[in-house]
Amino acid sequence: MPTKIKSVLFVCMGNICRSPSAEAMFRDKAKQAGLDIEVDSAGTIAYHQGNPPDKRSIAAGVKRGLSFDGMTARQVELEDFAHFDLILAADNQNLQDLQRICPAPFKSKLALILDFCEFDENAAIYVEVPDPYYGEGDGFELVLDLLDNSCSQLVQRIQRGSI
């Protein structure tokens, strides 16, 4: 019998670009689907702890109707592994960092955000959500395109009970 997902944690390195964007995107998609799911985000490092999401992430997300209200960066805590049903990392390095600190009974909760992506011409070349922090141009838009795809698929799988 499939596990009922009631909580999802999105993780990137600093919790100011990719994971808060994923939190905002998934929260919006889950709400539209009528799902009551706890959603949060965190980073594998504490460097930006207490800061709001990157202004470029917010600007790109707001254009798509996403809300970043009340979000502040925080670091993953050991309690998160027991608390959240699904913990999704933006890239392989963050997934490895999570696997290193995750207690053994909870390792099955870990995956990559894009593991849920439906591959199309845009998403086919990506297995990780690229970090737009140091980039210029449309990196934040690309992140949102990938998250839109993956979060839509994740919501559908949760609705079907196939995760």
Image (tube, rainbow, N blue to C red):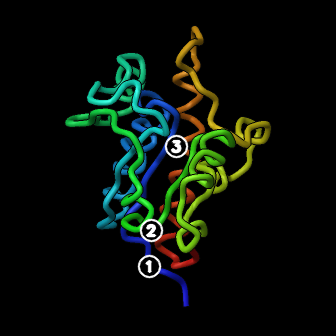
Tell me the residue at 40%/32% (across/down).
46
Task: Depth check: give the residue in front, 93 or 128.
Answer: 93
Residue 154 in picture, x, y percent from top left: 53, 60
Q: Earlier in the sequence, mark 1 or mark 3?
A: 1
* Neighbours of disc 3 within 10 Å: few (<14), some (14-19), many (20+): some
Label 3 sits on residue: 148
Q: Identify the secondary structure beneath mark 1.
A: loop
**Inter-mark Cα distance, 1 to 2:** 8 Å
Q: Residue placed farthest to the bottom in the image? A: 1
Label 2 sits on residue: 85
Task: Depth check: give the residue in front, 115 or 89.
Answer: 89
Label 1 sits on residue: 4
Residue type at tag 2: Asp
Q: Earlier in the sequence, mark 1 or mark 2?
A: 1
Q: Is residue 21 left or right of residue 38?
A: right
Quadrant location, the C terminus = bottom right
Residue 72 in picture, x, y percent from top left: 27, 33
Tell me the residue at 79%/37% (across/down).
125
Q: Is residue 111 above or below residue 145?
A: below
Residue 68, quarter of picture: top left
Q: Identify the secondary structure beneath mark 2.
A: loop
Tell me the residue at 66%/47% (across/down).
96
For the residues carrying marks 1 and 3, which lies nearer the camera in this image?
A: 1
